[in-house]
Amino acid sequence: MQKQPMTKEGADKLQAELNRLKKEERPRITQAIADAREHGDLKENAEYHAAREQQGLIEARIKHIEGVLGHSQIIDVTQIEANGKVIFGATVKLLNIDNDQEVLYRIVGNDESDVKQNKISINSPIARALIGKSEGDEVVVQAPSGNIDYEVLEVLYL
């Protein structure tokens, strides 16, 4: 399987969640199951069934995070000499030429993307159009609503 790019920030966040699930949530659920077993008949014990269901969800999340981290190539954009070019992990300040609105995007991996935080996936149309561009370049993004013209105002490596 091909490695997927991920920012160092994204990997650190997933690793912190994984540690919390393994060190806090898993023992808490194990104790909840043990406590529910002490109440007797398991067939009619709602606490036991709820704890087992929660245990399944936690184990599935742990497995998912381990899979994502195992198939990721961690890229620390602060350690790369990019010479002003837009690369994976860069933060790009754009000017929409049509309406003079400025927007700031960070190009991240698929599992990290969050439009509300202006983190866009490397596979998004905007990111694909921006990769390799420099400050001052004009970019045409083919969006579902039509073409959008942007000017690259600034490229930051945070």
Image (spheres, grey):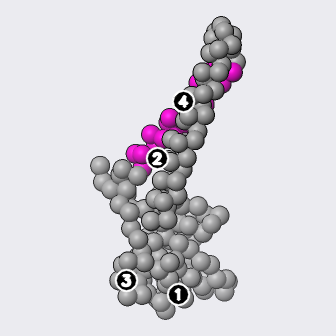
Badge 1 crowding class, 10 Å Cα cut-off, few under 14, some 14 to 19, many 20 or more, is some
Residue 154 rendering spot, x and y as whole percentages:
52, 87
Looking at the picture, tell me which residue is in the foreground, 10 or 119. 10
| Residue behind mark 4 | 56
Q: Is residue 101 left or right of residue 80?
A: right
Image check: 66 left or right of 48?
left
Question: Is 110 placed above or below 76 here?
Answer: above
Alpha-carbon distance for marks 2 and 4? 14 Å
Q: Nearer the viewer, mark 1 or mark 4?
A: 4
- Checking the image for residue 82, the label placed there is 3
Q: Residue at x 60, y 31 (%)?
A: 29
Looking at the rendered structure, the kind of residue marked 1 is Glu
Q: Is residue 103 visible?
A: yes
3 or 4: tag closer to the N-terminus? 4
Location of mark 2 (residue):
65
SS at badge 3:
loop
Residue type marked 4: Gly
Specify start and end residues of the magenta stretch as a single range.
47-68
